[in-house]
Image (tube, helix red, strand yellow):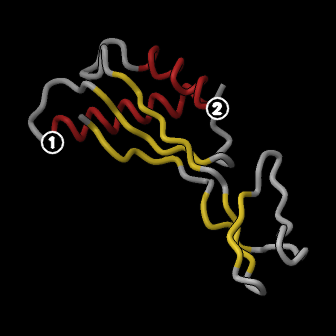
Amino acid sequence: MHELSIATAIVEQADERARADGADRVSAVTVRVGELSGVVPDALDFAFEMARDGTALAGARLVVEQVTARAWCGPCAEEFAVGMPPFFWCPRCDRPSTELRCGRELEIIAVE
């Protein structure tokens, strides 16, 4: 379960940010997780609960903002959801897309 290593990294980075801001505890961490990032949000939440113990994040909640994977079709200027499993074929002009606009994110966006 690679979510545990990801959760551990989130806890470490959030703890560093909190200490840099002079805070001794964190109440929440918000992360953006793309549909194609390979991270399962429920598994990440479970792993976060284990990783936060004994840190400034003990008791903190993890807020996960899920990002839908979207591709861009240049020939017809259409942006579309690729779904899961991903299908990179434009529903408008019936051509393959080569540009993924979003959906691979895995980033901390807020530490409270």
Q: Is residue 75 above or below residue 28?
A: below
Residue 51 lies left or right of residue 54; in this view the side is: right
Residue 95: image quadrant is: bottom right
User: In the visual, does 70 lie left or right of 60?
Assistant: right
Quadrant in which the N terminus appears? top right
Comparing labels 2 and 1, the label whose residue is closer to the camera: 2
Q: Who comes first in sequence, dot 2 or dot 1?
A: 1
The C terminus sits in image quarter: top left
* Residue drawn at the location 77% of the way across and 50% of the way down: 83
User: Residue at horizontal 39%, vertical 44%?
Assistant: 108
Query: What residue appears at the point 53 percent right and 17 percent down from the top-left corner?
Result: 46
Residue kind at label 1, given as amino acid type: Ala
Q: Residue at the left extreme?
A: 22
Which percent across, then down, holds residue 14? 31, 36
Dot 1 corresponds to which residue?
20
For label 2, the residue is 40
Residue drawn 45% across the image and 48% down it: 107
Task: Give the quadrant of residue 89.
Answer: bottom right
- Left or right of 109? Residue 70 is right
In the rendered image, the vertical position of residue 11 relative to residue 20, given as above or below: above
**What's under tag 2, amino acid-wise?**
Val
